[in-house]
Image: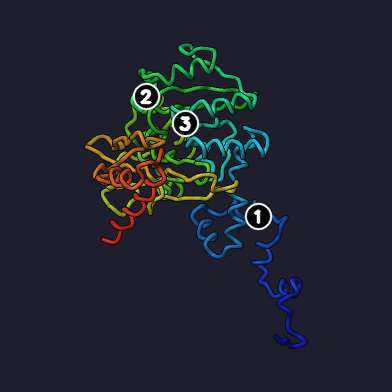
Amino acid sequence: MKTHANSPSLWDPSQVMSQTSPAMRFFELRMGPHDLLFAQIPTQDLVRLMCTCRRVYRLVHETCFDISRLLYPFFGDPSEVECFQRIQAQTGTLISGSIALQYFNRLIYPESDLDIYAHRVSAAIPVGFIVLNGYTFAPRKSQDPNVFVQLCASLEDKPPVASYLGRGIADVLDFHKGQKKIQLIIATATPIEIITSFHSTCVMNILTHDNGYAFYPRSTFVTRKALIIESIGASKEAGRQKYVDRGWEMVSAPSVSRQSELGVRMLRWVDDKFTWRMPLCLPRHLASDLSPINSWQLECDDDETWTQYSTLSHPALKQEYIVGDPSTFSGIMDDIISKHPTSRTLDIELQRAIVQRRADDSLQ
């Protein structure tokens, strides 16, 4: 290939760089003031900026959406953060609450706890990790001071903690290390049931081992509105007020439009067209992210809005899931079992079948 004497060589990075626009040179800086710039850009516009090219996407992602920045203060070491993420992959443990909201909103609430949501059958694994990381169990009056004795009690079929009655919670364990607090919420069935039963939609966000999902991103991060969800518990009003103080407007009426993320009687899925999914910056693909199996609907009457779902469980499934429309799963499990009779866990096959069913439905 011939080049003219005055044209830049394709193999000379310095000459190619000189032909790059000033804007792109700014994004290529390795030690640039990107934090300051991105902090001034609204979330919606920042997402649009990420769509311009791969280079800008990677820079914004690494600068603004690195989950490690939120988890380092709790675990203190990058290797410990990665270890926790592997536990998430192994057990389906989720992060939610204000930490997940901070991840998407690019804010830091210094007083925030780390809220971890675990399946009852595998809760001992994250508990062990938290204790080994130097945290001390702080029992409530009704709890055994030995965390593992209390954990065994949590695994028994018994009424949930009174203050959380009706929200799918088997137990709540508090851990402290200095000024830091981790709260482990143990689900009677699945963590998603608890999260979709929160007091309002602005806190319905999760961080898995692989992705972050914001279930109601437009209302939460663009219009700054939160739909009030009927939730049993003594602290629901205080919880809503906390987010009013942080800038959200609480609204009581859902939308009647099926084009709105807050529409009633509309089947919603984790990772559907309304969801904002953000791949995490830590090592990915440790295991399949099974969260998109879960679905729900919003229902309402004249005075209240609530989350409607049923629970899907099966001996061949590793986890339990919530189902917004049981007819969606009609025949799927029987078909999967007939095709994979010797498989001990069929969660991945169920996920594939659901993805295919949703794709087929979208074409109709």
Asked whether residue 265 is in view, the answer is no
Q: Which callout, 2 or 1, points at the residue further toward the start of the chain?
A: 1
Q: Whole-Å distance between the Cαs marked 1 and 3?
A: 36 Å
Neighbourhood count class around disc 1 (C-alpha, 10 Å): few under 14, some 14–19, many 20 upward: some
Q: Is residue 48 above or below residue 139?
A: below
Quick check: 90 left or right of 79? left
* Left or right: where 68 falls relative to 216: right
On the image, the x and y values in percent for residue 95 come to 50, 36
> In front: mark 3 or mark 2?
3
Residue where numbered disc 1 is placed: 34
The residue that mark 3 highlights is 118
Question: Are discs 3 and 2 less than 8 Å apart at CB?
Answer: no
Q: Amino acid at mark 1?
A: His
Q: Residues within 10 Å of mark 3 (few under 14, many from 20)?
A: many
Seen from the viewer's position, the closer of residues 270 and 358 is 358
Q: Nearer the viewer, residue 199 or 243?
A: 199
Question: Circle 2 is placed at which residue position?
Answer: 233
- Res. 104 mark: none
The x, y position of residue 349, in whole percent, is 38, 47
Provide the secondary structure element on which disc 2 rests.
loop
C-alpha span from label 3 to label 2: 20 Å
- Residue at 65%, 62% in the rendered image: 27
Which residue is at the front of the view, 15 or 125? 125
**Residue type beneath disc 3:** Ala
Residue that sits furthest to the left in the current view: 302
Q: Are marks 1 and 3 in contact (CB under 8 Å)?
A: no
First in residue order: circle 1 vs circle 3? 1
Residue 191 in picture, x, y percent from top left: 42, 34
Amino acid type at circle 2 is Gly
